Amino acid sequence: MIEIGDILLNCQDAEIEVEEVEKGKHGLLVTGHFVGKPLTFAGYVLWELPAIEEEECDWYNWPFRSFFTLPSEMRVGLVCFARGDWRSGVLQEYEKEWERTTATIREEEQGDESRL
């Protein structure tokens, strides 16, 4: 799906060259750098998170919910910590935060069902 050396497009069509891919319980932690810029990137591509049309800020426990466009032109959903956050690039932190997010989503869904 995503391999080292791939060039991915972020939500603003900026190119990111993949330097590392770590498989986790809920998805892939993708780290790399912006092509032609001295900026790094880390994002967690989740198995169960569909791609969205535009980046969202402050989505549940995440500063950003976004997407990548793969070389195959398929879009995949991802979440990110803010640049400079010590958790950025640490797989276990993405896993813990995603589990908190899904618990919050389930609680909201149960609350919605009880109001019907």
Image: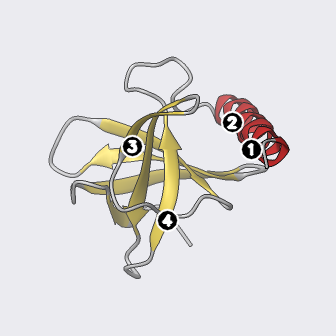
Q: Residue at x 46, y 40 (%)?
A: 42
Q: Earlier in the sequence, mark 1 or mark 4?
A: 4
Disc 1 vs disc 3: which is toward the camera? 1
SS at circle 1: helix
Q: Earlier in the sequence, mark 3 or mark 2?
A: 3
SS at circle 4: strand
Pointer 4 residue: 76
Tell me if label 1 and label 3 are in contact, CB under 8 Å. no
Pointer 2 residue: 101
Disc 1 vs disc 4: which is toward the camera? 1
Pointer 1 residue: 112
Q: CA distance from mark 3 to mark 2?
A: 15 Å
Name the one closer to the observer, 19 or 45: 45
The answer to which image quadrant residue 49 occupies is bottom right
Checking the image for residue 56, the label placed there is 3
Q: Residue at x 34, y 56 (%)?
A: 17
Residue type at mark 3 is Glu
